[in-house]
Image (cartoon, rainbow, N blue to C red):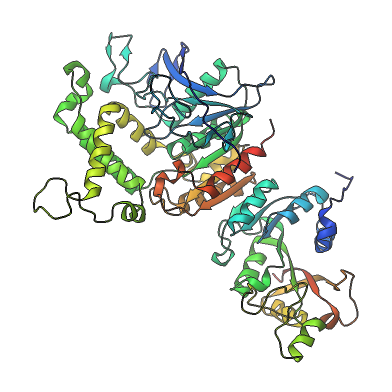
Amino acid sequence: MQDSKSVGVVIPQFVQIDKPLQLKSGLSLDSYHLVYETYGQLNAARSNAVLICHALSGNHHVAGVYAENEKSIGWWDNMVGPGRPIDTNRFFVIGVNNLGGCHGSTGPASIDPRTGKHYGAGFPVVTVEDWVETQAQLAEHLRIEQFSAVVGGSLGGMQAMQWTLDNPEKVRHALVIAAAPKLTAQNIAFNDVARQAIMTDQEFYGGNFYAYDTLPRRGLRLARMLGHITYLSDDSMAAKFGRSLRNGELSFGFDVEFEIESYLRYQGDKFADLFDANSYLLMTKALDYFDPAAAYNGDLSAAFRVAKANFLVISFTSDWRFSPERSREIVKALLNNELNVSYAEITSSYGHDSFLMTTPCYHQLVRAYMDNISI
Amino acid sequence: MTDITVPSTIALRPDFAVIAEWINPGAKILDLGCGDGSLLRYLRDTRDVFGYGVEIDDDNLLGCFRNGINVIHNDLEAGLSSFASDSFDYVILSQTLQAVRHTEGIIQEILRVGKEGIISFPNFGYWKNRMQVISGHMPVSETLPYNWYDTPNIHLCTLDDFEALCQQCNARILERSVMSNHYRPVNFLPNLRGMLAFYRFESRG
């Protein structure tokens, strides 16, 4: 293995964008701000920039740690860093928190300048297309005319795809990992149960819980527990928890008994304190709405006709949320357009979460692909 | 590109040159069971082709990435449903036919996806192989380097056998090239003296 390490201590940056943003919904925002992080150095030709798009619960903190908290390791620290597959010795890597998020970019918990109150449930529904537009504004701010690569897993992969459709000249490579060309009815159903869990929580107050100094903690917790089940595979849950009991014996009650219950509740609790309920609703809607083929009578190949980028598409064998078949739909559309595309189906038991794991074959392929990108 | 450079690959893989001879410059190519992408890379560098490899093995996939070759991770046995009909100038199956389970199926798929197909394979009728069978052993030779118990090769054939299968699959043979163990062309008694066989063919329509 090559020597690789973390990028070390990182500091988030902010950009205020005063250019009005016309959203797909028809609504608009007069101004907004984005929080982002960068790793590595932008070269003199400004040609080595890589944009990392985050998934449902991700954020701009892709790699490195914050000085004040050594446990605050970025969510893709195993992928991005000096000597890592996305090598910050070569690339200038950018992580950005999407609009509507809850980690520093303008979102439902921000103050609406028009009312002086929290946006709350009044924050407009944002789409993958809207995010790509805001990311393009960030690129303009950083004076990056073209990305070497736009990279994302899951919902992040959808943004990488959208980049190649909306800004075909501005992205040379798109790495679309554990993604899908659109959600299935089953996917949407899971998202809606998660939303219902949040919206039926009495502490939700129609999305204006900020005014009541409370959180819809129970709903968010359930939403996360449900989501988490869909990120893992049956096999990985069996391997990690099986039917193990916390206290070694059945208690014939309804408290936590099985280890899996304990794990999910812990994950749910942790998430409920960290994530904004309105942001969660927005992120799941962006997922539901993503469907680039819709404007072409469902013809994904027609949707990709404008794309010029080179593609790397990766899926994972145990991912049942966005299965390999869904990635193959993307690959087929790219092949039909005679675009440069490589596709890898990684054997992994970690389910949808595989894209975050350090599976050697997966990381070697991403490394080899990135190494071949000329800058 | 008119200036054709010959990379060092050709010294190691003289069979690539036979295939390259048949490929029109700038063609669109699908290489089935492409290994580490060496052939596609060679064709890209010498014939300016655009194309994709199809490969199932993880290590080979990595080789393709390192060679800068487009590769689709796919099991040939599952068919070529990702690829549209008549979408390639040539579909190549280089020294892989003998390891394919559904031989007829793959030939049908080559005929569907490609305007022309190119298949190369080790000739089981090669005299060295025949000698070993006569002496009572399964052959081990330059192009069949495996022992019977660890070979991936399950469908070995002779030139005559392959030509009969083409007939059966409605494939018209356009060109044939046979090479000796010294990688020289064999014209006399090819089914006995030839070690490697190359065929270019198309659908009878």
* Above or below, comparing residue A219 to residue A42 in the picture: below
Please indicate whether residue A122 sits to the left or right of residue B108 in the image: left
The answer, for residue A155, to whether it is visible in the render is yes
Residue A290 location (% of width, % of height) = 42, 37
* Above or below, comparing residue A326 to residue B131 in the picture: above
Name which residue lies at 43% across and 33% down.
Answer: A75
- Taking depth in this image into account, of A8 and A155 the one nearest to the observer is A8
Q: The N terminus of chain A appears in which quarter of the rendering?
A: top right
Residue A33 location (% of width, % of height) = 42, 15
Residue B126 location (% of width, % of height) = 80, 81
* Above or below, comparing residue A77 to residue A257 in the picture: above
Name which residue lies at 25% across and 31% down.
Answer: A272
- Taking depth in this image into account, of B187 and A237 the one nearest to the observer is A237
* Above or below, comparing residue B101 to residue A14 in the picture: below
Residue A364 location (% of width, % of height) = 58, 45
Please indicate whether residue A150 sits to the left or right of residue A278 in the image: right
Please indicate whether residue A139 sits to the left or right of residue B38 in the image: left
Name the quadrant containing residue B162: bottom right
The answer, for residue A179, to whether it is visible in the render is no
Count the numbered circles shown.
Answer: 0
Q: The C terminus of chain A appears in which quarter of the rendering?
A: top right
- Taking depth in this image into account, of B173 and B36 the one nearest to the observer is B36
Residue reaching furthest left?
A252
